[in-house]
Image: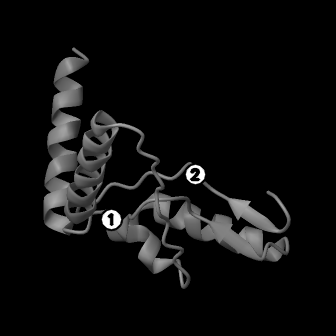
Amino acid sequence: IYRGHMNSYFTAFALDELAQHSPGNVLTFRHIEHSCERGMTVYDLGIGYEDYKTHWCDIIHELDDAYAVFSPLGSVAVSTMRLGEAVKDRIRRNRQLWQSLKTVKDYVSRRLSR
């Protein structure tokens, strides 16, 4: 909490058949409600696009990355990073593709933890 702003970066949501009854959604709602009751003027859900944020936010601050390039290799590195970010952004905004990618990631993570 800083100057009437609540910064919250602890959320995790599963997009499955129970998502509409998600305890995470209820907890976030209650936390926002409690923050308002305490006089908070802003509740910050952190950077990055996630679908659940569109249900809560009426203001979206677009963020930009700034890079300084000092060599041809740096130029290649920045171009590669920007391309990667653009691809990631497009994937995240496609609900079906993003969910599929998260499912694969969870599967691989479970397999590697054995």
Residue 26, position in %: x, y? 52, 66
Q: Position of residue 14 (x, y in %)?
A: 33, 54
Q: Secondary structure at mark 2?
A: loop
Q: Which mark is residue 9?
A: 2
Q: Is residue 111 left or right of residue 27?
A: left
Q: Earlier in the sequence, mark 1 or mark 2?
A: 2
Judged from this view, the residue extending furthest toward the top is 114
- Discs 1/2, front: 2
Query: How many numbered badges does the structure rendering display?
Result: 2
What residue sits 13% from the left and 53% below the top?
100
Q: Amino acid at mark 1?
A: Ala
Q: Quadrant of the C terminus?
A: top left
Q: Residue at x 25, y 68 (%)?
A: 93
32 and 19: which is toward the camera: 32
Report the residue that reaches farthest toward the bottom: 58
Residue 89 position in % (x across, y down):
28, 61
12 or 85: which is nearer to us? 85
Q: Amino acid at mark 2?
A: Tyr
Mark 1 and mark 2: Cα distance apart in space:
19 Å
Point 56% across, 82% down: residue: 59
Disc 1: which residue: 19
46 left or right of 40 in image: left
Q: Decide if residue 37 is on the left or right side of residue 42.
A: right
Which percent across, then down, holds residue 6? 73, 62
For mark 2, does the 10 Å Cα neighbourhood hold few (<14), some (14 to 19), or many (20 or more) residues? Answer: few
Residue 86's place in the image compared with 101, above or below, is below
